[in-house]
Image (cartoon, rainbow, N blue to C red):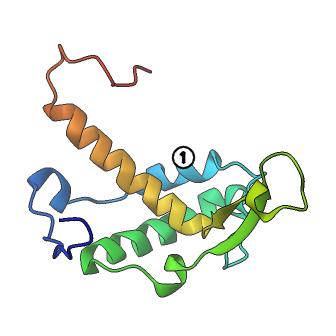
């Protein structure tokens, strides 16, 4: 089992196969970006994406929808800059650092859209009497 290669099956759940990302959803996610986060390998800072949210959202939504339709991601979105982040104690010891992967902010916008769709699909099939482990906003 462990280490065994399992072939990935295509998504067949009707709640997720027709996933479409809307422009308004992309605008909302872009507006809520944390501008203090570092940019990824594409070097596009969250600050620029946030400031241009209304202008770029339609194109970004169209791009994400095309990516979902083709079931592929741009190779650049699979890259990460890995940087060491200090944890504790003596800074001279390598074991006192942990690696952090800085991903493309644009890819994280798409990831958030897909996450929201999955979350709403799952919540729609869970009994309203099940309230443990579910965030209540």
Q: Is residue 38 visible?
A: no
Assess disc 1: are there few (<14), some (14-19) or many (≥20) residues with their C-alpha within 10 Å of its C-alpha. Answer: some
Q: Is residue 37 above or below residue 74?
A: above
On the image, the x and y values in percent for residue 59 come to 50, 72
Task: Look at the numbered disc 1 and give the secondary structure of its residue.
Answer: helix
What quarter of the picture does the N terminus occupy?
Answer: bottom left
Q: Nearer the viewer, residue 61 or 42?
A: 42
Q: Is residue 83 visible?
A: yes
- Corner quadrant of residue 119: top left
Q: Residue at x 28, y 39 (%)?
A: 120
For disc 1, the marked residue is 28
Q: Is residue 79 above or below residue 1?
A: below
Q: Is residue 22 above or below residue 119?
A: below
On the image, the x and y values in percent for residue 78 come to 49, 78
Q: Residue at x 65, y 66 (%)?
A: 102
What quarter of the picture does the C terminus occupy?
Answer: top left
136 left or right, relative to 2: right
Q: Residue at x 90, y 62 (%)?
A: 92
On the image, the x and y values in percent for residue 108 come to 53, 61
């Amino acid at each position: 089992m462990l280490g065994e290669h399992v072939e990935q099956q295509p998504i067949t759940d009707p709640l997720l196969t027709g996933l479409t990302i809307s422009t308004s959803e992309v605008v909302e996610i872009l507006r809520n970006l944390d501008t203090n986060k570092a940019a990824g390998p594409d070097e596009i800072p969250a600050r620029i994406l946030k400031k241009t949210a209304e202008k770029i959202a339609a194109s970004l939504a169209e791009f994400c929808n095309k990516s979902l339709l083709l079931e592929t991601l741009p190779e650049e979105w699979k890259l990460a800059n890995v940087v060491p982040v200090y944890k504790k104690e003596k800074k001279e010891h390598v074991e006192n650092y942990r690696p952090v992967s800085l991903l493309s902010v644009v890819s994280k916008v798409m990831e958030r859209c897909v996450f929201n769709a999955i979350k709403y699909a799952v919540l729609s099939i869970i009994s309203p009497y099940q309230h443990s482990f579910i965030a209540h906003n």
